[in-house]
Each structure stands twice: as C-alpha cells, then as structure tokens.
Image (cartoon, rainbow, N blue to C red):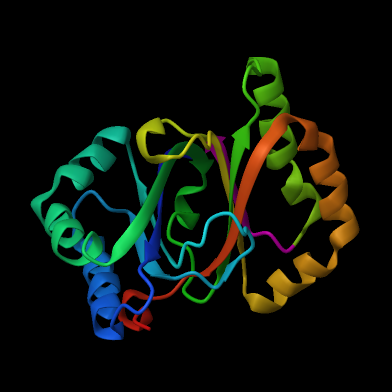
Amino acid sequence: MSQTIEHIVLFKVKEDTDSSKINTMVNGLNGLSSLDQVLHLSAGPIYKNRSSSFNFTHMLHSRYKSKEDLGNYSAHQSHLSVVRESVLPICDDLMAVDWVADLDDLAVVPKSGSVMRVSFLKLKEGLGESEKGDVLKVIGGIKEHFGSIEQLSVGENFSPARAKGFSIASLAILPGLNELEALNSNEQVVKEQKEKVKELLDSVIVLDYVIQSPQSASL
C-alpha cells in the first residue's frame, strides 16, 4: 500500500449552456491527464446526484503521488487556462475536496466503465477528534458489508477553502452499473451504517459517476 492524493472537483454548469461549450470544458479537463504530475484523471457528467441540496452536473477525479504534485498540477499553466477559458464562464458553482488515501499501487488507475460512488460528509459543529474518528471508522468499514466494492478510499479533507465545510470524503469503486444497483437495493445494510453516525452529521453529498476513458467523456 502507498499513499495517494485524491482530488475531486464538482461543477455545476449553468442551465441552458450550449452543449458544445460543455464538451469543450470536459475535453479540456480530460486533456490535463497528460500532465506529468497526474497519475489518473477522469472528467465527465455525473451519472446520478443523490443530494437535493447541491445540483452539481459534472465531476473531475484525479490522483497524485504527493501534495506537492497536486499543487504543481493546480498551478500548471495548462490547468489554469482550462479553468479560466472553459470552466469559469459556464459554471455557477464549484466545490473541491482533497484527501490522502492508502491505495494499492496497481489500482491507482480505475478501469474505464467502472462506477464510483462519492460521499462528502459535513460534521456538526463542535465535534472532537474522537467523533471524527468514529465517522471515519464507520465509512472505512463499509467495504466489509459489500463485496462488490473493488476499492474504498476514505480520508479527511486537507483543502478547506473550496469544500463548503465538508471535511470527510470517501469514494467506492464498483465494477459497473449492475453492481451499483445491487448496492442500492441492499437498503437495510446501508441504513444500519448510516444510523451509526447520523447524529454526528450536519449534511451529506452522495453522487455516482461512471469512469470513462478521456476519449469517450464528451456528452
């Protein structure tokens, strides 16, 4: 196992935006996968948003060897150009979360076509480290209950500026949509896990994303 930096950005594209501009944004973001610092990058439309409070439409997920590599990616002229020219003109909301995960080196690049469930948790104010640890433990133990989860990444956000107060993140990677539907149908187990931490949470964002190859990520 080695430490990997997870970076997720959520985008809310303005309503009535021309589809060609959306494609330009998605293609521009996916083009950043060629930067030296990037281990993996996928950007595209969100498959399903399960949270009514935030209407995000698109997502970018990328991975790095270190916080320094993430910083260099963020400051890279190519990244800044895509954000300035293709993202900001058509988006009216953005959110970004970063965390450190322990991952198997062989699984840093998810398979194209697999599905990712992303969860962001905002804890109630005034909670201490022990309560935070309880939440991380429950989220980290979810894989034991769902054998279809190929990879589970959980951690505490280290970039609060753009995270809207959400401090814990997780992503679960499943082989495909069939496994995602099977997970959704097992409501009892999901409910039991939620009950363990419900009293500690202020709000939660949950969404599903299909990992696409950069060539097929356009709408």
Query: Where residue 173 sits: x, y (%)?
Result: 59, 60
Give 85 or 6, whichever is nearer the viewer: 85
The number of numbered discs placed on residues in the rendered structure image is 0
For the point 44% across and 54% down, the residue is 108
* Residue 139 position by quadrant: top right
- Left or right, 59 with reference to 19: right
Quadrant of the drawing holding the C terminus: bottom left
Give 33 or 16, whichever is nearer the viewer: 16
Query: Where residue 18 sits: x, y (%)?
Result: 28, 83
Q: Residue furthest front?
A: 16
Query: Where residue 210 sits: x, y (%)?
Result: 52, 72
For the point 47% across and 62% down, the residue is 56
Q: Which SS type dominates the magenta stretch?
A: strand
Q: Residue furthest left?
A: 77
**Residue 55 belongs to the span the image colors magenta:** no
- Left or right, 15 with reference to 106: left
**Residue 152 belongs to the span the image colors magenta:** yes
Give 184 or 22, whichever is nearer the viewer: 22
For residue 200, above or below residue 153: above
Q: Which residues are magenta?
A: 148-155
For residue 97, above or below residue 178: above
Say whether residue 70 is visible: yes
Query: Where residue 7 sits: x, y (%)?
Result: 39, 47
Q: Residue furthest right?
A: 188
For the point 21% across and 69% down, the residue is 28
Say whether residue 6 is visible: no
For the point 23% across and 38% down, the residue is 71
- Left or right, 91 with reference to 173: left
For residue 141, above or below residue 148: above
